[in-house]
Image (cartoon, grey):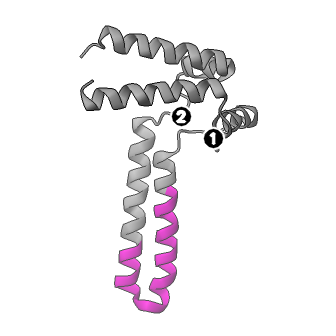
Amino acid sequence: MPLSEHEQQLLDQLEQQLRSEDPRFAQNISQPRPSGGGSVSAKRFVIGVLGLLAGIAITIASIYFFGMPFGAVGGVIGFAVMVAGGYWAVNGGSGSAPTDSVHNATTAKASAGSTAGSSNFMDRLEDRWEKRRRGE
């Protein structure tokens, strides 16, 4: 469903305010993400799920066939295989997600304090919302 003209104007106004208050953040979210970054391939996911299922099977089989003293060791090994399989299934292929400390600091600053202009803008939006709810 397309936006009404009024909603489109509000959206444009919000976008302009975002670009004026934090141009670096606006630029970061408007840029397309590189392909393959953070996505999980189907093959990797299937292998991870199979590893997870193998870990469950190892845990159950070791406790069933070897009893409690030796089955507990097999259970720990099976649990480790389950965790590794689950990690493999959901990990996007890189060892760890890259962190952007500058971006995180900028985002924290932007969310920690608000300027007087943005609070006035939010107050106006809240007033408009209340008027709309009351039917004015």
Q: Quadrant of residue 8?
A: top left
To which residue does mark 2 refer?
Answer: 38
* Residue drawn at x 66%, y 21% as measured from the top left: 21
Can you give x and y, in whole percent of width and height, for residue 74 in the image?
Answer: 48, 78
The C terminus - image quarter: top left
Circles 1 and 2, Cβ within 8 Å, touching? The answer is yes
To which residue does mark 1 refer?
Answer: 97
Q: Amino acid at mark 2?
A: Gly
Q: Quadrant of residue 106?
A: top right
Question: Residue 77 lies in magenta, yes or no?
Answer: yes
| Mark 1 and mark 2: Cα distance apart in space | 8 Å
* Magenta region, residue range: 59-84
* Residue drawn at x 39%, y 36% as measured from the top left: 42
The N terminus - image quarter: top left
**Numbered disc 2: secondary structure:** loop
Pick whichever, 32 or 113, lies toward us: 113
**Numbered disc 1: secondary structure:** loop
Q: Examine the rendered structure and indicate whether residue 82 appears above or below residue 44.
A: below
Most distant residue in the front direction: 136
Pick whichever, 67 or 9, lies toward us: 9
Q: Amino acid at mark 1?
A: Ala
